[in-house]
Structures are given as C-alpha cells and as structure tokens.
C-alpha cells in the first residue's frame, strides 16, 4: 500500500487541462502503479484531495483546478469549497453537463465523464 502526500495530489491535479477530468480513483491507480504498490489508501486520498482544493481556494494566484477532480463514477464533491453548486458551475463553464440522480439522497454527476477523462 502506498500513501501519497497531499503535494503529490496537487501536482497531479494541476496537470488536468480545461475541459478534461480526473477521478480520485484514477489518481490512486496512477500513484500505485508509479510506486510499485498494489493500491493506495482510499480514505487519505479523499482527505488529501479536499486539502488540495481548500489550499487552492485560499490562494490568490497559482490555482489548482481541483473542480476537475471527481469522486467515483463522476460524482461531484460536496466537500470542495462552495460545495456542489460551485463545482457544478465551474464544470458547466468548461462544457460539461451535470445531472442529478436520486430522489431522497440526491447526488450530482458529470454526464458521460468517462469521455473527458485525462490520461496520466
């Protein structure tokens, strides 16, 4: 098992160009492969992605496009700055369609996110 530090998540999340997307799972697979590990720790991955998002949000310059990193299955991340609404707005500005699923436990996803995945 490999534990990538938050700075490594930031470095990878910065690679994603306008209109492209990543998932936390894709990042974890990339780190596992690069380090020769079987997998990376999923809980710290989620925490570190959130740390990257909040650190970027607090900087005036040199932003990390954290809104382009999604949860599993293309789901938006409510823990990002501004929550779902802010991430949805930024993704739609880049041409993505965000859809709602569920009636009681409502979640939001990027439609056909697989077509926009960035290759690491």
Image: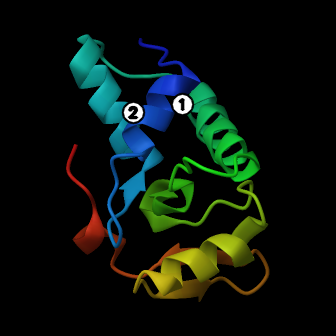
Q: Secondary structure at mark 1?
A: helix
Task: Answer with mark 2 or mark 1, whichever residue precedes in sequence.
Answer: 2
* Disc 2/disc 1 C-alpha distance (Å): 8 Å
The residue identified by callout 1 is 42
Q: Nearer the viewer, residue 79 or 105?
A: 79
Image position, residue 28 (x, y; %): 39, 33
Query: Where is residue 50, by image quadrant?
Result: top right
In the drawing, does residue 95 fall left or right of residue 30?
right
Of 96 and 109, nearer the camera is 96
14 or 113, nearer to the observer: 14
Quadrant occupied by the C terminus: top left
Task: Specify the label residue 28 is tagged with.
Answer: 2
- Say above or below: 40 vs 59: above
Name the residue at the front extreme.
61
Q: Residue at x 76, y 66 (%)?
A: 83
| Picture coordinates of residue 92, whole percent (x, y) | 51, 85
Q: Is the residue under label 1 in contact with that under label 2 (CB below 8 Å)? A: yes
């Amino acid at each position: 098992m490999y534990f990538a530090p938050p700075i490594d998540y930031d470095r990878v999340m910065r690679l994603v160009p306008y209109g492209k997307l990543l998932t936390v799972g894709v990042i974890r697979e990339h780190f596992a492969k690069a380090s020769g590990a079987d997998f990376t720790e999923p809980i710290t991955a989620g925490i570190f992605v959130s740390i990257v998002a909040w650190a970027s949000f607090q900087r005036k310059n040199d932003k990390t496009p954290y809104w382009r990193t999604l949860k599993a299955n293309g789901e938006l991340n409510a823990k990002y700055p501004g929550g779902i609404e802010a991430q949805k707005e930024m993704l739609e500005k880049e041409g993505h369609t965000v859809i709602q699923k569920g009636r009681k436990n409502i979640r939001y996803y990027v439609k056909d996110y697989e077509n926009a995945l960035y290759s690491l």
